[in-house]
Image (cartoon, rainbow, N blue to C red):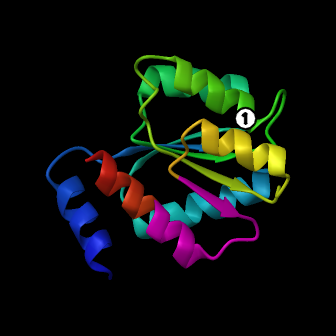
Amino acid sequence: MALMEATALNNLSTGAPPVLLLVEDNPEQRGLLREFLSDILPCDLREAADGYVALDHARTARPNLILLDLQVPPHGGIEVLHSLRTEADLGDVPVIIMSGSRLPSDLAEVAAAGVFRFIEKPYSLDDLESAIFAALSAGA
């Protein structure tokens, strides 16, 4: 385990498990990510298949980290991201974008909204794990 991941786990072990919000419309992908997250980290996982549910969960649970796909209905992950960034209680929550999109306009909007990390699909689980622990360490 990398030093960064060990530090994140040490910080997390002193309190309640972190709340993670997984926003992914594909049920198979969501299931795989759910299993992956349960293997790497004790957490309170909230899931959303669309932007409306994602924002509702974010407002009620105040997650420590949001994993967000850009292709979620009805308006897309960029709209969800903009909504998160305009809310006082959610504006600083780290967001990891997971997307197959390499459109320059999407990348520019994501960067302007201040995401923690952009991970291109298909992604390496090692890269995703490192990004998760880095985000949780930064927010600790």
Q: Is residue 62 left or right of residue 30?
A: left
Does 128 sit above or below residue 95? below
Q: Is residue 91 left or right of residue 120?
A: left
Does 35 sit above or below residue 115? below
Nearer to us in this view, 82 or 69: 82
Give the x, y percent position of residue 18.
Answer: 34, 46
Nearer to us in this view, 48 or 106: 106
Residue 24 in view? no
At 59% from the left and 74% from the top, the residue drawn is 125
Give the x, y percent position of residue 81.
Answer: 63, 32
At 24% from the left and 44% from the top, the residue drawn is 16
Residue 106 lies within the magenta run? no
Name the residue carrying label 1: 78
At 22% from the left and 67% from the top, the residue drawn is 7
Give the x, y percent position of residue 82.
Answer: 64, 26
Identity, as a three-letter code, of the amino acid under mark 1:
Ile
Q: Residue furthest left?
A: 14
What is the crowding at mark 1: few (fewer than 14 residues within 10 Å), some, or many (at least 20)? many
Residue 120 lies within the magenta run? yes
Q: Secondary structure at mark 1?
A: helix
User: In which quarter of the view is residue 11 placed?
Assistant: bottom left
Nearer to us in this view, 9 or 34: 9
Q: Residue furthest bottom?
A: 1
Q: Number of callouts in the render? A: 1
Give the x, y percent position of residue 78.
Answer: 72, 35
State which region is magenta. Answer: 117-131
